[in-house]
């Protein structure tokens, strides 16, 4: 992945151009940012079993918060990012402690309420901080020159890749830690964990805060990549997109979240281009209408995956791997039972 900006690779129909072109690098960088956000949602949903409809609030906090801190406090990129991480920890701890007073659907509704409040706040543009419906522009005066402009898309690609690697490492560490194992046990049977003398609330809160901080970090990269932020990144629709990525890739799988995000982002971008292709207009209405609606096609793919590939794309990969392993073992067994194989076995015994 790190070498792609230096190569001249083309995948017609999947990528908009060669891998070294700004358009393709931007698309791949966006996919990596969303993969990092999907990994943070994997911590909530796949590890702790917390169905949240408000995770976009923390992604939006990273995107809008970084820009506001740089602009209002006149801080450089790194100090502003560090300050925002502190804000994300405090905010997610408070809101998480409130949300986790309930479980299941009530928890999902509480998180949705907080996210909707943030979405409305961003659109209202208080103090002219967020830009309202038009969104907020990146304050480039406080950002290094090598991260600004189309010509520096290659640098932004590497920043997005580094952020994804860091997010994956953090999620892996949390999932393999004691808190991660306890969170998985809480997901299966919270009462049993409580009887064993552990405190499920604190464990779930720790997972909630970790997932929120990672989402905020990816939101900061999203701000740099798109030179601004729009209200959509704080909406419930954005959270549902993260949920779809996790389910598409395979619930409970870190690699599944990454693969699901890449597939979702690339399909959503390329299907939009396909919908405007002249060839679509010449098709019969029964084909033209659905093919001109990218979200309809994405929804159809999602339904098919849920129905026929319950473990998601990651589960499909594991099943194919097991199938090939069984076939290889069967071929080896057949070879051993052939006359030639038996002769070789006898020679070895002698």
Image (cartoon, rainbow, N blue to C red):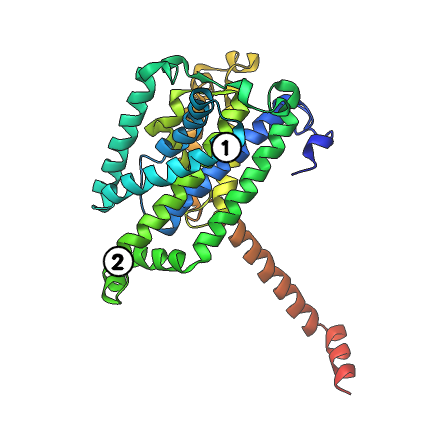
Tell me if residue 15 can be seen: no
- Which element carries disc 1, helix, strand or loop? helix
Q: Residue at x 62, y 19 (%)?
A: 150
Tell me if residue 332 can be seen: yes
Q: Which residue is drawn at 30% across and 26% down?
A: 118
- Residue that badge 2 annotates: 190
Q: Which residue is drawn at 73% across and 31% down?
A: 6
Residue 266 badge? none
Q: From the image, which quarter does the N terminus lie in?
A: top right
Between marks 2 and 1 in the image, the one whose residue lies nearer the viewer? 1
Number of marks in the rendered image: 2
Q: Nearer the viewer, residue 169 or 128?
A: 128
Which is nearer the N-term, disc 2 or disc 1? Answer: 1
Q: Which residue is drawn at 38% across and 35% down?
A: 87
Q: Is residue 176 left or right of residue 322?
A: left
Q: Which of 339 and 150 is in front in this view?
A: 150
Q: Quadrant of residue 208?
A: top left
Q: How crowded is mark 1: few (under 14 residues within 10 Å), some or many (20 or more)?
A: few
Q: From the image, which quarter does the C terminus lie in?
A: bottom right
Residue 215 position within the rendered picture, expressed as x and y whole percent measured from the top left: 43, 37
Q: Distance between the residues labelled 2 and 1?
A: 40 Å
Residue 79 badge? 1
Q: Nearer the viewer, residue 243 or 95?
A: 95
> CB of mark 2 within 8 Å of CB of mark 1?
no
Residue 148 position within the rendered picture, expressed as x and y whole percent measured from the top left: 60, 21
Q: Is residue 52 left or right of residue 314?
A: left
Note whether 85 is above or below 254 in the view shown: above
Residue 326 position within the rendered picture, expressed as x and y whole percent measured from the top left: 58, 62
Residue 137 position within the rendered picture, expressed as x and y whole percent measured from the top left: 47, 16
- Which element carries disc 2, helix, strand or loop? helix
Note whether 88 is above or below 234 in the view shown: below
């Amino acid at each position: 992945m790190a070498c792609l900006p230096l190569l001249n690779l083309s995948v017609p129909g999947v990528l908009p151009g060669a891998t070294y072109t700004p358009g393709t690098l931007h698309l791949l960088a966006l996919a990596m940012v969303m993969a990092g956000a999907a990994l943070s949602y994997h911590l909530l949903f796949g590890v702790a079993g917390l169905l949240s409809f408000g995770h976009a609030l923390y992604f939006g906090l990273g995107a809008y918060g970084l820009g506001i801190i740089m602009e209002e406090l006149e801080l450089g990129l790194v100090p502003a990012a560090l300050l925002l991480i502190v804000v994300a920890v405090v905010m997610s701890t408070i809101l998480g402690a409130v949300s986790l007073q309930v479980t299941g659907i009530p928890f999902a509704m509480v998180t949705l309420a907080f996210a909707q409040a943030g979405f409305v706040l961003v659109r209202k543009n208080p103090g002219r901080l967020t830009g309202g419906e038009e969104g907020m522009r990146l304050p480039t005066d406080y950002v290094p020159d090598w991260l600004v402009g189309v010509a520096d898309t290659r640098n932004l690609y590497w920043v997005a890749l580094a952020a994804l690697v860091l997010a994956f490492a953090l999620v892996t560490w949390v999932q393999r830690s004691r808190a991660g194992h306890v969170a998985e046990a809480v997901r299966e049977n919270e009462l049993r964990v409580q009887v064993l003398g552990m405190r499920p609330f604190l464990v779930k809160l720790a997972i909630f805060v970790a997932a929120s901080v990672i989402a905020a970090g990816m939101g900061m990269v999203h701000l740099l990549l798109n030179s601004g932020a729009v209200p959509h990144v704080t909406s419930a629709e954005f959270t549902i997109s993260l949920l779809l990525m996790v389910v598409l890739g395979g619930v409970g799988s870190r690699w599944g979240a990454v693969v699901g995000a890449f597939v979702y982002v690339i399909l959503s971008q390329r299907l939009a281009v396909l919908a405007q292709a002249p060839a679509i207009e010449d098709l019969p209405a029964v084909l033209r209408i659905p093919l001109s609606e990218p979200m309809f096609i994405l929804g159809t793919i999602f339904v098919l995956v849920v129905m026929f590939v319950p473990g998601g794309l990651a589960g499909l990969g594991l099943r194919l791997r097991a199938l090939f392993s069984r076939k290889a073992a069967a071929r080896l067994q057949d070879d051993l039972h052939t006359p030639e194989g038996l002769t070789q076995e006898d020679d070895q015994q002698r």
